[in-house]
Image (spheres, rainbow, N blue to C red):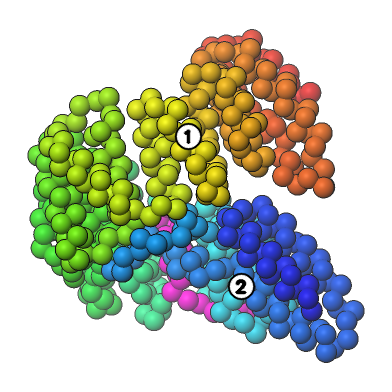
Amino acid sequence: HMFPQTHMYALEAAVALRNARVVGDIYRQAMHAMAASRELDPRSLKRVYAALSHLFWSIFPVRAQQALINTRGPKAAVFSIESSADRAWDPARLGSALLASLYRDACEWASSDRRLLSRIMQFLLRALFSEGHRSRAMDLYIYLLHGAAGSDSGRLVKAQMTPEILCEVVSGLCRHSQLDEAYATLMDAGREHRSIYVWNAYFDGLANAAFSSSLGSERALERLRQAMRRMETADGVEPDIATRSIWLRACFRFGSWEAGEKYFRSNHAGMQQDVVCWDTVIRGQLTSPDPVAQKVGWQLVDELVKRVEAGTLAADARLLETVLQHILRHLYSHFAPAYAPNTDVVRRIFAWLAASLPQARHNTFAVVIGWLLAAGRMDDALELHETMRHCALWPSKSLNCMVVRAIAQQSAAQSVEFIEGRLPRQHFNAAYFAVLKLAVQRRDYDEAWCIIDRHYPEISAAATADSPEYSAPFPDATMYSTVLRLTSENGDHRQHRLLLDRMQA
């Protein structure tokens, strides 16, 4: 009975690191150990079953359960926010194959925990949609609603339908541009499952689809407005803060910044106390090409600072980082903005941000490093990157790749030295891919082949069961396909042919 507890702690650690590969490896080892527990006496087996429910739940921490849709209501100040909150763990990253296996295991070992089965089903549906398996996802959802005689799913315990599951289906259909099917699915579901979160998923998908289509701004906003009216008519549900923020974001995306600013000032449902609405408005105003919009945006920033200092608004770290991005853009950008605010005001806000932002937050470091690199201050950026490592705030893969790309712009040799000396092994493929891609774009094929010839045999030879971090070959399929595409676009047919020969070998 100690096996489930030990693996549960290991799973919790892997989830905290947000490493889907490690989570999958530990889970498979745990289930292999559980297979041996069937030989135990009934008393020990009972303890194993009791511990297994906790083992499964360790893959779905509270933060992942709350990340159903990019919405949140008013909350207190979170200046002490932990660094692990920079990027929430999404169990759907485990992939549909592993999640389907996990669901079968849960049906066998913890079938009485229907809430657990529903949670696994929620992320299994999300994974299927994200992998492009819309038909499989809808078949699974229909089985969940009505059952399916003769289906492979028929041998499994059926999960309980929840609003979260409906939210995943509606959101997934919208991402696949199936808006009519998403609305039909929404309306066919029971009234008890059509929560405001599900409606917001539909509104968000509708706004995104309208933005990518040829609809004009007025027609797109009217279509979204009509959908919100249907919610109030069909279910009697009033828009919440998240609904208001979706409308605000749509206004700015479609270029109607005056309508967005006016709507924000109307303060429906206390929008001026919500940090998401503030973030949306400030981001929308300051990224607008209209100098009048940018001027209003800087006035909003000044108003935000005064409200937070007066204690009438509780701002979180993400809102402050939005302001920090635009402050850094003004201080270090090589391009003149459409509207230039007073420099003294900008420096005063910058000093206030430095005192207010948490000192141990990955995303804050990433924002500052990104703008130092954009300003050409390479030494300062590398010094800050090293500071993160000394503080045990290990830089993410995306941040490391951003730094590697900037170094490679100056010297490919120095970027290789940086990768070998500072990055963890699990980031090697992504980092070398950035260098390889840049070398091919520059038509520096000597450097490109140096990377391929040097690292392919080394990493492939290390791909053993004892070193699963090297289970993916180098270069991998993504690298090959990208380099093949770039050589074709460059018209470098000889290099293209050599690369094809290497793949076949």
Q: Tell me the amino acid under the disc marked 2.
A: Trp
Q: Is residue 294 visible?
A: no
Quarter of the image for residue 331 reads: top left
Identify which residue is drawn at 72% across, 44% down.
Answer: 469
Query: Which labelled disc corresponds to residue 383?
Result: 1
- Image quarter (top left, top right, bottom left or bottom right) of the C terminus: top right
- Within the magenta stretch, is there residue 166? yes
* Front-most of residues 71 and 296: 296
Identify which residue is drawn at 65% across, 84% down.
Answer: 112
The span shown in magenta is 155-175
* Front-most of residues 281 and 309: 309
> Left of 204 or right of it: where is 383?
right
Q: Is residue 40 visible?
A: yes
Identify which residue is drawn at 73% across, 41% down.
Answer: 470
Q: Tell me the amino acid under the disc marked 1.
A: Glu
Q: For the image shown, how many numbered marks are present on the structure?
A: 2
- Image quarter (top left, top right, bottom left or bottom right) of the N terminus: bottom right
Q: Residues within 10 Å of mark 1 (few under 14, many from 20)?
A: few
* Front-most of residues 188 and 264: 264
Query: Which labelled disc corresponds to residue 443?
Result: none
Relative image position of residue 296 (x, y in whole percent): 11, 45
Q: Pointer 2: what residue? A: 57
Relative image position of residue 458 (x, y in whole percent): 77, 29
Secondary structure of residue under mark 1: helix
> Left of 222 or right of it: where is 480?
right
